[in-house]
Structures are given as C-alpha cells and as structure tokens.
Image: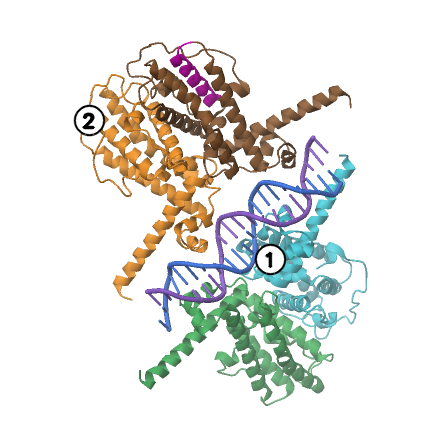
Chain colours: A cyan, B green, C orange, D brown, E blue, F purple
Amino acid sequence: MCPRQAAQLEQLKGERRRAVLRAAREVFARKGYAAAKIVDIAAAAGISHGLVHHYFPGKEALFAAVIQETVEAWETLVAEVRQQPGTPWERLVHLCSRMMRGLYDEPEHLLVIVHAYTEDAALAVRDGLNRYQRQIDEPLVALIEEAQRDGAVTPGPPEELARAWMAMVKGLAIGRVMNPASALPPLELVLRILKASYPHSETTPLEPSNEDRGRLGSL
Amino acid sequence: MCPRQAAQLEQLKGERRRAVLRAAREVFARKGYAAAKIVDIAAAAGISHGLVHHYFPGKEALFAAVIQETVEAWETLVAEVRQQPGTPWERLVHLCSRMMRGLYDEPEHLLVIVHAYTEDAALAVRDGLNRYQRQIDEPLVALIEEAQRDGAVTPGPPEELARAWMAMVKGLAIGRVMNPASALPPLELVLRILKASYPHSETTPLEPSNEDRGRLGSL
Amino acid sequence: MCPRQAAQLEQLKGERRRAVLRAAREVFARKGYAAAKIVDIAAAAGISHGLVHHYFPGKEALFAAVIQETVEAWETLVAEVRQQPGTPWERLVHLCSRMMRGLYDEPEHLLVIVHAYTEDAALAVRDGLNRYQRQIDEPLVALIEEAQRDGAVTPGPPEELARAWMAMVKGLAIGRVMNPASALPPLELVLRILKASYPHSETTPLEPSNEDRGRLGSL
Amino acid sequence: MCPRQAAQLEQLKGERRRAVLRAAREVFARKGYAAAKIVDIAAAAGISHGLVHHYFPGKEALFAAVIQETVEAWETLVAEVRQQPGTPWERLVHLCSRMMRGLYDEPEHLLVIVHAYTEDAALAVRDGLNRYQRQIDEPLVALIEEAQRDGAVTPGPPEELARAWMAMVKGLAIGRVMNPASALPPLELVLRILKASYPHSETTPLEPSNEDRGRLGSL
DNA sequence: TATGAATGAGCATTCATTCAT
DNA sequence: CATGAATGAATGCTCATTCAT
C-alpha cells in the first residue's frame, strides 16, 4: 500500500469520525444524554451501531468528545475576538454576532452544553465541564469589564451581566434546536442587556462580514 | 369506617399525591425525563417505588402531571397579574418580579418546561405542551404590547421580545437548579431587554409585596 | 406486617439467593465463566434473568460468591478434619474420604475452582482466589508432613505430594461433572500417591461413617 | 510465477497456518473457548484478525483443528510407544515420561483437551472429541493391562487406573499453564498410582533419550 | 395501602465474520 | 495475501411496571 493511499485512508477515517461526532452532537442536543440512543446516532451518521464503537469507546466518551469540541470552538472564537481591532464594545458586538450566527447555523453546539449541565449527563462529563467553566466565563467577563470602563456597557457586576447574557443565549439555543423554523431575535435585542442606556457610541456596525464558517465560527 | 376517617384518608391521599408530584418535579428538573428514575422520585418522596403507581399510572403520566401543574400555575399567575391595578409597565414588572421569585424558590417549575421541550420527553407530553403554548405565550405578548403603546417597552415585534425574555428566564432556571448557590441577577437587569431606552416613567416600584407563595405564586 | 412474616420473608429471600447460587455453581462449573450466560443460570434457578440481578450485582460478583462459598466449605472441612482423633494418616484418610464424597455429590464445587484458575474468569476473581491459595494448600501440606513423620506417607517434598494429589482430584472433578455417569476410583487408589510403599500401619479403616452432608461435607 | 516461488509460497502458507494454530492453542488453553477472542489469537500469531479467516473458516473450526492436532499427536505417541522394545512396564514408563515432558514443554496441548470436555466449547467439537475418546483411552488401558499381567502394575480395573492417572495429568496441565513457574512432580511420583506396591522390577530407567520434539513428541 | 419480589422490553457493548481496498 | 472498516447477532444490565403478600 503506497503512502498516498494510507494517507487517504487516514483522512477517510478522520472524516468518518467527524461525521459520527456531528451526528452525536445533533442527537445529544435534541434528546439529552440519557434519551439519546446509540442507534439513533448511528442512524443519523448513516452507519451501523457497532461501528460507532470503532471510533469511540462508548457513549460517555462520545458525549465527552462532543463537549470538548464545543469548548474548543468557544476558545478559538474568544481568542479570535480578542485580537480583533476596534473598541471593546465593537469586540463584544463581534463576539455576540458570531454567537448569534452559531446559534443560527449550529445551535446544537450550545444546547449540548445545556444538557451537560444537567444531571442527565454522566457525572464524569459534568466534572470535566466544570473544570472548563473558568475558561469559558472569564474571557466574556473580561470583555464586558473593558467595555464598562469605556462606558459602553451598563454598570454593575460584570459576572452578573455575563451570566444573564449567557442564560439568554442558552435559552435561545433550546428554542432554536427544538423548533428550527423559529426566528432568532436581532442582535440589537440580544445586546440590550449589556448596552449602556445612554450609549456613548452610537455605532453598532453589526458585523456585516464574511466567511467565518466551520469549526471556528460555529459557536 | 366513619365519614370523618374517610375524609381524612382522602386528604392524606391528596397530600401524598402532592408529595410525589413535588418529588417528581425536582427529579425531572434535575435529571430530565429519560434519566429520572422512578425509584429516585419515590425515594425523594419517602415512599417505595411500587406506591408511585398507586397515584400515577406511569412515568409518562407523572411527567405530564408535573407539566400540567406548571402550566396551571403560570395561568393563575397571569390571570392575577392581569387584574393588577397600575400601568401596563407596572403589571409587567409585577409579573417579572413574581417569576424571579419563582426562579428563586422553585426553579424546578421552569426547568421542567425546558426538559419538556426537549425530545428527551415522551412525544405525547411534548404535543400536550405545544397545545398549551399559545396560552402561555399570548398573555405575555399582550402585556408587552400594551406597555409598548405606553412607550414603556422598547419598540419591535412583541413576540420577539417575549421570546427573548423567556429564553433568558429559562437559561437562568437551568443555572439555578444545577447550582443553587449561584445568585440570580436583579430584576432591573432582567428587565433591560424590555425597557425602553428613554423610559417615560422613571418609577419601577419593584413590587415589594407579600405573601404569594405556594402553588400559585411559584412561577 | 408481624415480625413472624418479616422473618419468613427474610428467610425466603435467603433461600432464593442460595438457589441462585447453587444454579450458578452448576452452570459455571459446566460451562466456565465466559460461556455461562446469565439466562442459563436464571433458567437453572427457575427465575427470570432480571431477578438474578436482584440478588447479585452482576455476573462477576455472582461468580465471586460461588468461589467464596467453595473456599469457605473447604476451610470448614479442613478445620473439622484437624480436630479429628486418631493418627495423622487416619485424618488424611478422613479428609480424602470426605473429598471423594464431595466429588461424588457436588463435583461442581471443585470444578468451579478449576475455572477460576483459568484466564476465562475475570481477573478480579482470580486475584481473590490467589489470596486464598495459601489457606487452601497449607493445611493439606501440614497434614501430609505429619503423616510423613509417622512413616505413613511416602517421603519427599510434601508440597509436591499435595500438588499431585490435588491435581488428580481436580481432574476427577472435571470428568465427574462432564459425565456424571462415570464412576469415581476407590479411595485406596486415590491414596496410592501418598501412601508409603511399606505402610507402617496396615489399617486404612476407610471411614465408613456417617451423616456428614450439606455445606460442610460438600467438598 | 515460477514453480519454485509457488512452492515457497505454499510452504509459507503452511508455516503461517501452523503459527496460527500454535497461537490458538496457547490462547484457547489459557482462556477457554468462549473467552478466547480471535483478535487475541491473531495478535499472538502476529497477524491481523481478518487473516485468521484465510486459514480457518471460523473460530469453531480453529478450535476443532487444535483439538485434532492434539489427538493426532497422542496417537502418534502411543503408536511409537507400542513398538518400543522392553517390558510392558518399561513401555508404560516411556509413555509417562514422554507425557511429562509434553506437560513441561507444551502443557497447552493437554489443557486444551480439558476445555474441550467443558461445555464451554461448541457442541460439535465436544461430539468430535467423544468419538475419539476410545482411541485415546484404549491404548493406555491396554498398556496397563499388559503390565498388570506382569505384576508390575497394581491389580484392579485397568480403566479405573487409566482414568485416575489421566485425571492427575490433566490437573497438572492446568497448574502448569496457569502458573508456568510451578515445578512438575517427578516421574516416580506420577507413577505411584500405577506401580505395584512390591514392584517385581526395580528398574525404572526413566528414558533419558532424545530428540523427540515437535508435533509428535509434544504430548 | 404499602412493599419489594418478579418480569421482560430496551439499551450499551462485544465480537465473530465479511468484504472492499 | 493482508488489513481493518463494517455489520449484526448475542449478551449483560437497567428499569418501568405488575402483582402477591
């Protein structure tokens, strides 16, 4: 077998694995951990249930992989937003815009997190998620804090604002997954919680851009 | 058996039933439908698992009863708020305040709804909930509409505002049940989505009141 | 429920548990650990497979319980033989006689040990057995040593004699379980490995006795 | 492809097959039929599990082949011993010596037989073995009978003696495979069951010989 | 009523076997 | 030939539900 074939095979395997992961995310998001059956995931991925265990040791590991993927996507997104030019408020808008798009394109990404917080999920997974919690919350809190210093965000404990905002996003994710036909609120509405009542900057350019798709922009 | 005893017995039965219902709500909220085990609920209610089936035909019916109870509490709450004196904005604030208190005291009430929307729950239950959907959303939408006419609520499609606001409340319910130690955001913050940027009325009296506890005020 | 009933219930439960244990021993002995199916055991005990898990946490625990029972029976037997009157040789004959009867009545008891030594069995069980090994071998070795000092047993390392003798007994257990119709060799034959060629004592009274049945004499 | 290459290939194939067979014997002996996994055998043979099915139609056939090989080795051994010069007792000693060496070098050969007797193995295999049973036992019985006529072996039903002796050998095989560090008892000890108490011949020359290795002398 | 023993459908997981590459 | 991806039957285990006591 020549190296080219071997590489192709490897790639094919990776693709298959990713397909299983995507199917799993969908099913886990829609049904929750306990109600999601391995056969459902296999069917959604177009393979037999036995093959799922070829790529993942078991249901729990599969769920953990789904969560990990989401956490990584979040981290990538935050890192990108961090080095965005402009005012803190513009970066916040950017982040928010990206999340709304993620909510539109792949709401499962977020909903799966909701399920992970539930006791529905295996304890091991929840523990793992708790360890990430800091990494997930802190960047958002930092961003809000900066924007507050600029007077662009309403005063008050930034953790509180972050929590309320994330709560809304999670709630929207639920609605989005369960009823894909339902529209999402416009960005301005979602930003109302944060925006200072008498905003110093009138511009909310709303991020018209671009191509950001795939793994990175999926959140 | 004399009538008095019969009545006592009947009452005891009702109490027991309610205890099971409460236990079920808690467990369903924490674990979701599929992961919630009848034995868990029985243990939480302090009875044997066999006895649960004396009060409810089965797991699905039990979950349906939990949902129904929540829907009824919501309806009662809305009806009460409707006939509250004051401006539409004041009634909205009252509703919001009551919900926040419900979120504080019995977040399960709301979280259970989240699970019900999930495909985790039996199809029959979800269908039932969908039928109620109108009754749940409409009063809130109406209230928002009225307040918009007064200029107290920001303009825009009232359904959109209602949905975003409910999304946040659901998200907060998740956080509350999973981590009871976490604080809830203040009422003002939660109202920021709705409140007009240049509010015509500066007063948000915040409803200091009263005794409303128990089944009705629990939402 | 009166105490009498409770006690009866408790006893009934114990009986059922023992029935499952007996069935398990039989099936494990005949098939080995891996090939023994829980349904087989359940069927042999006359119950459903689900009920097996009411009495034992799982297959491995069930097997461990079977082994433990056998080890305990062996310990009881050895303790009894120890305080038997007569010469060491007579005690050895007594032990041997009892084992032959056990081989006749309940060969599963011994065969199950054979399977436990195999890698067929779960590692945990084998480790557990290895810890008992000393307790199992030592008393026999001691008995042989004593009898050697009397000149009743042929000279040589007593461990070697014990091992050879135990090997034969295990081999006979295999034959006995797999073909219950096959006769066992007489006691004299089984003792030939041990007996001194020119026995100092012509008497081998061969233990005509008695009632020893049940758990104790079962080995 | 030239004939030479074809022959080499054929030979290679035969070697490979034999390697698989050897690996299978080892794994089957250690784990039993049911617990032995094809992948284990493949790994032990240094090939992929898929390739095992190029050489053997399936697991059962593989086990059957292992058993057959053992039976054939036994038959060869007996045939060789038959035409050995000397007294019947000397031939018996020779047989015994060869078996002890087999026990030392390849105890799997014998242990596999133990597993085959167990219901662990597929029924077909066990039936096959039962058909061989006569061929296995009879020569040993005949040999014992001859030696009894000479007075070299203790009197009694020769089948009984044969069975007891085989039982011990099987038991020793178990110990040997499971704990390769354990020593085997000396030939004299193993022969004590058979040897007449007042042996007419003092000589037990113990067969110092030779090269007999490989398939034939392995039992 | 109240209990928990008993049942069996449903699910995760394993593994022999097949087959495309 | 050789590999390992793919399949699905088989199996241990869970848990909702029933029912004898």
Q: Is residue A159 visible?
A: yes
Q: In which quadrant will I find the C terminus of chain B?
A: bottom right
Residue at position x 64%, y 84% in the image: B89
**Residue matched to label 1:** A37
Question: Percent x, y for residue D178?
Answer: 45, 30
Say left or right for A79 vs B25. right
Where residue D187 is drawn, which disc sits there? none
Asked if badges 1 and 2 are on one and the same chain, I answer: no
Residue A142 visible in the picture = no
Mark 1–mark 2 Cα distance, whole angstroms, equals 68 Å
The disc labelled 1 sits on which kind of residue?
A: Lys
Q: x%, y% of residue D91?
A: 42, 14
Q: Specify few, some or many for label 1: CA neighbours under 10 Å numbering under 14, 14-19, or 20 or more.
A: some
Write down the region rendered in magenta.
D86-105
Chain designation of label 1: A
The numbered disc on residue C87 is: 2
Main SS of the magenta part reads: helix
